[in-house]
């Protein structure tokens, strides 16, 4: 059975920003948030892909903006949020989904890839939160959804730097939640297991060490991106006093 889509309704006129929306999980989240009634600003570097998804959403009667943005660029992220707020209204939901990873053994010193994972998954995440958090606290309302990974529950060979970046995401989220819950802001971490996305396929090509290859070279089931989008929708559609703080979603056959 494929991934069925059960739509929940969001409060009318909600504005969402989704990073990493040009493909994979972020594209699925954008489509489902729009179908549930949110106005969605979709951000990524590949504007042509964003525009295709924007057209699809518009044809379905939804509202979406395609905004070229590299989350590593702090000024660019601020412009993304300002443009969204001028065009659609104050941001109610920020989904920090943009991410980068590679299966590399640390002893092989792929230092440029270490930097990219830290720059996108850690600093990019902070750039995005920094651009919305004061506004959300002032308005006493907001929801930040951070895309984590099941690698924070179990180590996977070849993903040391990536796991480190997702541990940062989890620790920061738990602490931020303590700080902003009284300001009406919710923080959710979604921890997917294997999901079938362009990034996941590309990343398997980076397997480089025999131990690493042996671990990942068997066929294993992966989830559809829509399943993760449903988890995000579930979290953001809850009544104001309910906080879904953590969601672990894995293929049934691959429990940790
Ligand atoms: N797939 C899985 O099995 C899995 C499992 C656990 C967690 N996750 C997490 O889920 C999230 C999405 O993964 P995915 O599998 O959908 O990956 P994907 O297919 O590689 O998509 C990644 C998205 O992030 C965007 N992105 C990358 N670097 C960016 C940057 N510097 N600025 C703006 N956007 C950037 C890409 O867009 P552009 O290239 O157009 O910029 C793309 O839209 C990631 O945070 C990942 O860590 C995935």
Image (cartoon, rainbow, N blue to C red):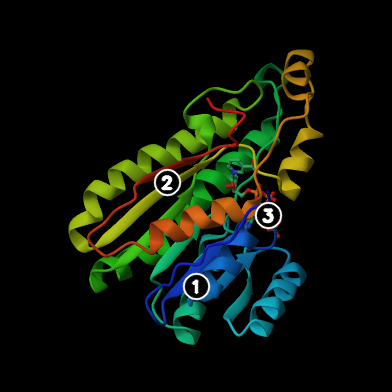
> Residue drawn 62% across and 61% down?
28
What crowding class fits label 3: few (fewer than 14 Cα within 10 Å), some (14-19), or many (20 or more)? some
Residue at the front extreme of this rendering: 1
The x, y position of residue 76, in whole percent, is 56, 67
Residues at marks 2 and 3, CA–CA distance in whole angstroms? 18 Å
256 relative to 232, above or below: above
In the image, 105: left or right of 88? right
Mark seen at residue 24: 3
Question: Dot 2: what SS?
Answer: strand
Q: Earlier in the sequence, mark 3 or mark 1?
A: 3
The x, y position of residue 200, in whole percent, is 72, 41
Question: Dot 3: what SS?
Answer: helix
Asked if the residue at label 2 sits under 8 Å from ligand 1, the reply is: no
> Residue drawn 71% across and 48% down?
197
Q: Earlier in the sequence, mark 1 or mark 2?
A: 1
What crowding class fits label 2: few (fewer than 14 Cα within 10 Å), some (14-19), or many (20 or more)? many
Q: Is residue 82 visible?
A: yes
Mark seen at residue 36: 1
Mark seen at residue 65: none
Q: Which residue is mark 2?
A: 189
Asked if the residue at label 3 sits under 8 Å from ligand 1, the reply is: yes
């Amino acid at each position: 059975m494929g991934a069925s889509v059960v739509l929940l309704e969001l409060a009318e006129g909600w504005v969402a920003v989704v990073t990493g929306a040009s493909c994979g999980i972020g594209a699925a989240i954008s489509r489902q948030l729009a179908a549930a009634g949110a106005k969605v600003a979709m951000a990524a570097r590949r504007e042509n892909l964003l525009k295709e998804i924007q057209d699809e959403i518009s044809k379905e009667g939804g509202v979406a903006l395609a905004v070229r943005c590299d989350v590593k660029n702090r000024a660019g992220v601020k412009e993304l949020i300002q443009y969204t707020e001028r065009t659609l209204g104050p941001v109610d939901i920020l989904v920090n989904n943009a991410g980068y990873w590679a299966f590399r053994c640390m002893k092989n010193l792929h230092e440029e890839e270490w930097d990219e994972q830290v720059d996108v998954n850690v600093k990019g995440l902070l750039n995005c939160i920094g651009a919305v958090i004061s506004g959300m606290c002032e308005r006493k309302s907001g929801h930040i959804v951070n895309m984590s990974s099941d690698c924070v529950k179990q180590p996977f060979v070849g993903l040391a730097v990536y796991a480190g970046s997702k541990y940062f995401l989890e620790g920061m989220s738990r602490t931020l939640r303590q700080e902003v819950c009284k300001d009406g802001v919710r923080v959710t971490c979604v921890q997917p297991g294997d999901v079938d996305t362009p990034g996941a396929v590309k990343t398997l090509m980076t397997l480089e060490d025999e131990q690493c290859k042996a671990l990942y070279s068997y066929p294993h089931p992966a989830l559809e991106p829509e399943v993760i989008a449903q988890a995000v929708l579930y979290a953001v559609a809850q009544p104001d006093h309910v906080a879904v703080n953590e969601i672990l979603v894995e293929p049934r056959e691959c429990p940790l």
